[in-house]
């Protein structure tokens, strides 16, 4: 099947992790036998302000995916004005699409990621050229807060003008149904984990009991709360450690919290890590923890589970669908008593979890093959 992927954001030289899940899904679809083309007309951020590819239509074959990119810088401000953002995105999208049409490209299905701006602009493309449209929503904003009037209008238009609107979690789908009043074309398809993350019965290099966590160091991820609860749970223990990977605006504040509580021997901020380094950390930990306030899905949970690690998570939207008594402990958001107890229970009873079974169950639901199979069924059902 000939697929056109339109992402709202996508990896670049300056931001290689930006939209990495969109890229990996496109590659997985290509490996499964689909002909996949990506049109990337998303804004460049400040780290790409001097990227030589700005304002140029470029092409690369990315592991079998035909990627056409025509990105412009946001100049720190354009992306804040929704009408301008949509106008530029839609104009460039139609420009590149017409170029590809002249080259002989024909598409059976358009698949856009996130309703704003890609989903909305793709709906206009779909209407004009009569190509079936799938939109997958990923935005945590639709879980954290009610969308503003204009955003809600765009969401309603997008859901109403696509053949299938996919959410990555049940909580997100329920919110979208509530915001739009539309339910007949909604479906849940989860995110997938990269094949880098797999079960390997590697013996830990340390005798310490290690909790590992990863995420942007922002308030929503609740790392200050996690550190505080960890300290209260294991104040008198010297063999229990907490290792946190990720960069972000709260790094200095979190380091100050660690220093002021004399936790430098027990809690460590690792900074930003690549996939291979995260895999190493997962292989060398006993359990994973992320007590964030809101997640549309939470790929880091399934990455940990794919490596056979039990997780501690909050009922933050995304984790609700993922975590159960066979693979971890699910607690309420911002509940100090429950997180302290979850830490202690995991430390005392980690052996009750079957690591190999956790990995197998995760693979059955969230592997590339499992997710691509679900998407392919959707494409086949809507193809004209």
Image: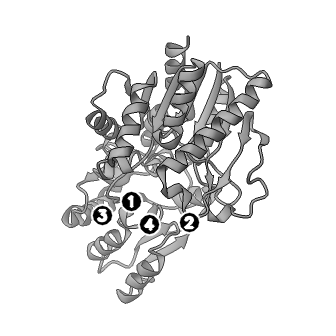
**Residue 377 percent across, percent down from the top left:** 51, 18
Disc 1 or disc 2, which is closer to the eye?
A: 1
Contact (CB < 8 A) between labels 4 and 2? no
Is residue 202 left or right of 152 when viewed as pictured? right
Mark 4 nearby-residue class (10 Å; few <14, some 14–19, many ≥20)? many
Q: CA distance from mark 2 to mark 3?
A: 21 Å
Which residue does the numbered mark 4 point to in the structure image? 210
Is residue 283 left or right of 46 when viewed as pictured? left
Disc 2 or disc 3, which is closer to the eye?
A: 3
Which residue does the numbered mark 2 point to in the structure image? 205
| Image vertical order of residue 35 relative to residue 26, above or below | above
Q: CA distance from mark 3 to mark 1?
A: 9 Å
Disc 1 or disc 4, which is closer to the eye?
A: 1
Q: CA distance from mark 3 to mark 4?
A: 11 Å
**Residue 26 percent across, percent down from the top left:** 63, 35
Seen from the viewer's position, the closer of residues 258 and 235 is 258
Q: Residue furthest left?
A: 337
- Quarter of the image for residue 59 reads top right
Is residue 305 left or right of 53 when viewed as pictured? left
Instruction: Please tell me which residue is depicted at 74% across the width and 51% down the height of the picture.
Output: 55
Tell which circle, 4 or 2, labels the residue nearer the N-terminal end. Answer: 2
Which residue does the numbered mark 3 point to in the structure image? 343
Q: Give the total of numbered labels.
A: 4
């Amino acid at each position: 099947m000939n697929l056109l992927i339109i992402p709202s954001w996508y990896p670049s030289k300056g931001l290689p992790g930006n939209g990495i899940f969109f890229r990996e899904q496109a590659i997985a679809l290509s490996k499964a036998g689909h002909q996949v083309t990506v049109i990337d007309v998303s804004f460049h951020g400040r780290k790409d302000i001097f990227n030589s590819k700005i304002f140029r239509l470029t092409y690369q074959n990315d592991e079998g995916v035909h990627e056409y990119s025509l990105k412009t810088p946001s100049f720190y401000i354009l992306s804040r004005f929704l009408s301008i953002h949509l106008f530029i995105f839609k104009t460039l999208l139609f420009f590149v699409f017409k170029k590809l049409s002249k080259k002989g490209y024909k598409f059976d299905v358009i698949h856009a990621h996130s309703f704003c701006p890609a989903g909305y602009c793709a709906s206009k493309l779909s209407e004009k050229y009569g190509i079936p449209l799938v939109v997958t929503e990923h935005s945590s904003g639709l879980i954290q807060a009610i969308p503003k009037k204009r955003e809600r209008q765009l969401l309603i238009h997008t859901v109403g003008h696509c053949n299938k609107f996919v959410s990555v979690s049940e909580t997100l789908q329920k919110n979208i149904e509530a915001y739009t009043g539309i339910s007949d074309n909604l479906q849940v398809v989860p995110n997938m984990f990269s094949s880098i993350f797999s079960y390997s019965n590697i013996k830990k290099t340390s005798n310490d009991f290690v909790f590992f966590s990863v995420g942007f160091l922002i308030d929503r991820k609740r790392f200050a709360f996690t550190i505080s609860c960890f300290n209260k749970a294991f104040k008198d223990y010297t063999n229990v450690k907490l290792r946190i990977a990720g960069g972000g605006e709260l790094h200095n504040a979190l380091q100050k919290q660690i220093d002021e509580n004399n936790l430098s021997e027990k809690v460590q901020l690792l900074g930003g890590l690549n996939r291979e380094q995260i895999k190493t950390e997962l292989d060398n930990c006993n359990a994973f923890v992320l007590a964030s306030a809101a997640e549309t899905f939470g790929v880091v949970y399934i990455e940990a589970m794919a490596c056979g690690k039990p997780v501690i998570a909050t009922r933050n939207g995304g984790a609700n669908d993922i975590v159960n008594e066979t693979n971890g402990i699910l607690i309420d958001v911002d509940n100090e008593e429950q997180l302290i107890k979850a830490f202690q229970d995991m430390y005392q009873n980690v052996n009750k979890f079957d690591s190999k079974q956790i990995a197998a169950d995760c693979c059955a639901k969230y592997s590339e093959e499992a997710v691509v199979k679900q998407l392919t069924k959707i494409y086949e059902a809507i193809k004209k």
